[in-house]
Image (cartoon, rainbow, N blue to C red):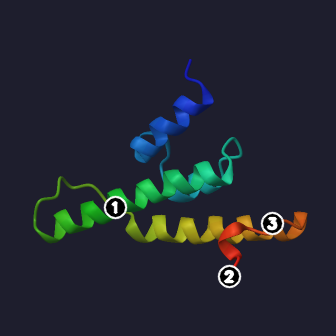
Amino acid sequence: MATHQEHVESAISDPTRHYARPMDVVHDAELAPGEKRRILESWKKDAELLSTAQAENMSGGERPQLQEASLALEALEKETRALDTDTGLERLSDRG
């Protein structure tokens, strides 16, 4: 049985092995916001590379999901901001 950290590292390495869609990462209650962000950023990077490969006719038929990954990252950011506001925390990235 994999530990939580092993699951997270595996999901970062290959998000599509663990999740059907990027929004599934956002809705995973077992993950902390930072873990979700790392997984989604990896997914977005993979999708960008796949989109480039498809543009150069080097695709293996996979769907890049670039827009879905970008939208999931935006949704996570909104969710994280809402949680920060609710708890009165100030995010470091929001400071000048």
Residue marked by disc 2: 96
Q: Residue 82: x, y in percent? A: 79, 70
24 relative position to 66: left or right: right
Of the pair 79 and 24, the residue shown nearer to us: 79
> Which residue: 65% across, 47% down?
28
Asked which secondary structure carries label 3, the reply is helix
Q: Are marks 3 and 1 in contact (CB under 8 Å)?
A: no
Of the pair 65 and 35, the residue shown nearer to us: 35
17 relative position to 46: left or right: right
Quarter-of-image position of residue 67? bottom left
Q: First in sequence, mark 3 or 1: give its number.
A: 1
Q: CA distance from mark 2 to mark 3?
A: 17 Å
Mark 2 or 3: in front is 2
Q: First in sequence, mark 1 or 2: give its number.
A: 1
Say few, some or many: other residues with alpha carbon within 10 Å of mark 2 (under 14 / 14 to 19 / 20 or more).
few
Q: Residue 37: x, y in percent? A: 56, 57
Asked which secondary structure carries label 2, the reply is loop
> Which residue: 64% across, 64% down?
76
Q: Quadrant of the N terminus?
A: top right
Say few, some or many: other residues with alpha carbon within 10 Å of mark 3 (under 14 / 14 to 19 / 20 or more).
few
Residue marked by disc 1: 47
